[in-house]
Image (cartoon, rainbow, N blue to C red):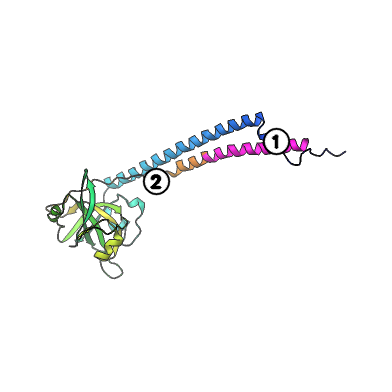
Amino acid sequence: MSAPAPTSARPEYLRTALTPRMLVLLVLLLGAAAVCVRLGMWQLDRAEIRGRDDAEARVAEAVQGAPVPLGEVLGPQQTFRGELVGRKVEVRGTFEDDELLVVDRALDGRTGYLVLSPLRVDGVAGADGRAPVLAVIRGWVATEDEASGVAAPVGPVTVTGYLQAGESAGDGGAGPGMTDSISPAVLVNRWGGPTYSGYLVVSEVEPAPGAVPQRLPLPTTSGGGLNVQNLAYALQWWIFGGFAVLLWGRIVRDTARDEWRTT
């Protein structure tokens, strides 16, 4: 004797989902999902904190360590890698005359100018045989008149400082002898090339010049990305939360089908 045919054409999923047992299960699983989401957010916060701490530790290590020759970490026209920010390097060369003032730069709550000088690097040659140019921030001045009294030293020098990534081009609205950005892509049109994709913030020049602009503070980081391990943990918790909701849907579907087959 054959089994009786189901009384309805298809399983009644909605009716099964609204039964007290399924609603209680839904509340429990939603609670579990909420816990997973909260744990994921906590891991995301940890990823941000650890990412910042890791970046600060890298910068501190680079600042406190001995300088390395510029050519060991960055060559002309090479891509500037993120881990080079704050890297302490030394380079030998000769400052050229075409100095610029970078406008609207603040230091200790005052707005003034960065003194930007081209350094023709020794011991390196580009494809055209010319020595490359490195943009060097020698310091900060409050006024244009102050900048005239802190000219770059003449003759070969050894410069020690901290690498920074080149900036995007500005709007070009600065006056003669000035610029609104430290952009290698813009500076190459003025100074010639080849150039470096980053610039150097001076901490020391040998032989020491007489008058110098005010030195900038040691480099710091503003954010440092996310710690990959904690980010992975956050994603895992969110996936677990999603599974909890999907599990309820699967239980409702299977229960409705079983009831449909047995009616």
For the N terminus, the image quarter is: top right
* Main secondary structure found in the magenta portion: helix
Find disc 1 in the rendering and name its residue: 255
Which residue is painted at 29% across and 65% down in the image? 194
The answer to whether 240 appears left or right of 174 in the picture is right
Eyeballing the image, is 186 above or below 61? below
Nearer to me, 137 or 254: 254
**Magenta stretch, residue numbers:** 238-263
**First in residue order: circle 2 vs circle 1:** 2
Q: What residue type is labelled 1?
A: Thr
Pointers 2 and 1 in contact (C-beta within 8 Å): no
> Total label count?
2
The x and y percentages for residue 65 are 28, 47
Eyeballing the image, is 155 above or below 105? below
Which residue is painted at 14% across and 57% down in the image? 151
Between disc 2 and disc 1, the foreground one is 1
Find disc 2 in the rendering and name its residue: 225
